[in-house]
Amino acid sequence: MAATHNEITASLWLQYAWHRHDGPDPVAWRSAADWEAGKQAEARASTELMVEVRRTAPDLEDTIRTLHDQFGTPQCVRDQRARRSPAPSSTWPGWYEPRDMIAIAMGAPEPCRLNGLWWHDREHYPLEGIGSVAELARLKMPDWPRVGCVQRMLDSRERWRQERPDEPPAGFGIIWDNLAVPGRGEVATICYPSYVDLGLYLMGATRFLTILGGEPELADAFMELCFELSISYTEYLLSLRSESFTGLCGFGGDATFFLSPTLYPRYGAAWDARLFAHVCARHRLPTEAPCNLHSCGASAHLYAAWGRHPCHRNITAMQTRLIPGAVGRLRSSLPDVELELTLHPPQFDLVAAEPEATRAILRQSAADAGGRNVHFSVITAAQQPTDLPRVTRNVQAIIDEMTALRSAARPARRPQCAATGAST
């Protein structure tokens, strides 16, 4: 696909790792007033943190804000968002995400909350001891309305409705509003838990990957169970709250990079194709509906397989780790998609890098991506306040290089974003 508009974008997610930031527990909140008090306490702690940040790195906030204002999203997307009606406030504390809920329903302990994140008990996986297809066959699909954690989630939601009738509760976390479609902007998509992710949550990495690599009959049967779990729970949530979407956010999964090129077609791509067929039939999505493809970790060993994906024509965005020197191969496999590339240790550490190295990796990677349809998502953690001046210099280096990349682009007519459609 010929480039029609060169607007490479970038964003930064910076964690202040020395700062404890628990905030209120969205599962354990007792009342709306209690939740609000917890959020206010969290805001006060954040304000105290930022006093320290400003004292150590006075220009950091403004530099990050400049990066996001100028380069965070394409102008096409900013125009599209400006045309939308403002979304109603959604302040319900929410609950565990679907992968957690499915695992808990199958017998996993509930995760604990620390520093604003959920952490799993890695010593106890509900299906780790499964040893045969016959054992899997004896498992029953959860009756979702009767599952304890689901009942508590619905009770929590209803309690919010009663206490805050003017503040609609949020959704159940199955819709992603920002799937990039080059030349079109972004669309809303529905998310189903993937096999590779459910496998880790239900069996743990060691047992699950051992099955995939050496027990194909059991792996196939387990994939059937996971498909039914993913579909049944997601469809149950849709029955509770109608959602609008025009595409699918369910190809790949966080743990796709664990699969070998041999295993990927059987347990990655085949799952995706089956899921896509289900969503098209169940929700009347057109066969050209857009989808994303995802793999959190370093995945160069899968690039060629991604180019042969059975739904290759539907993939409009690829989220994966940036591997220096390998972006050209990724672009060759996925020539027409938005590459959303994560710069993250160990491949790249913004805190440790020199500004010129930061500029160089963006410059080379943008060129290798063909100078089009690429977003650099930089994720880093400052371990101590003394890291912040270097972060500031590197964020400025990102701005400088993005400015240079934009100015080097050949002028072209800006594409108009299509209005976002909807399907339920």
Image (cartoon, grey):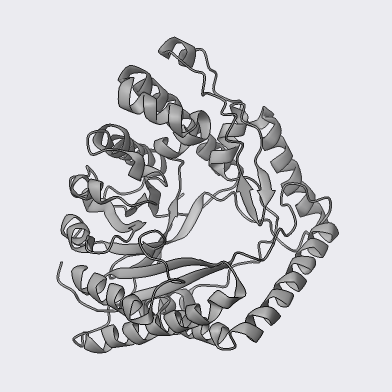
Residue 372: tell me if it is visible.
no
Q: Point out the image quarter for the N terminus.
A: bottom left
Answer with the quarter of the image where residue 189 lies: bottom left
203 to the left or right of 403: right
**Residue 296 horizontal/vertical position (percent):** 39, 52
In the depicted structure, whether residue 374 falls above or below residue 244? below
170 to the left or right of 210: right
**Residue 267 horizontal/vertical position (percent):** 31, 33
Q: Residue at x 23, y 39 (%)?
A: 261
Q: Residue at x 51, y 39 (%)?
A: 234
152 to the left or right of 97: right
Answer with the quarter of the image where residue 86 lies: bottom right
Q: Residue at x 27, y 47 (%)?
A: 287
**Residue 123 horizontal/vertical position (percent):** 59, 31
Q: Residue at x 42, y 67 (%)?
A: 349
Disc tally is 0
Nearest the viewer among 135 and 191 is 135
**Residue 159 horizontal/vertical position (percent):** 79, 49
In the depicted structure, whether residue 280 falls above or below residue 186? above
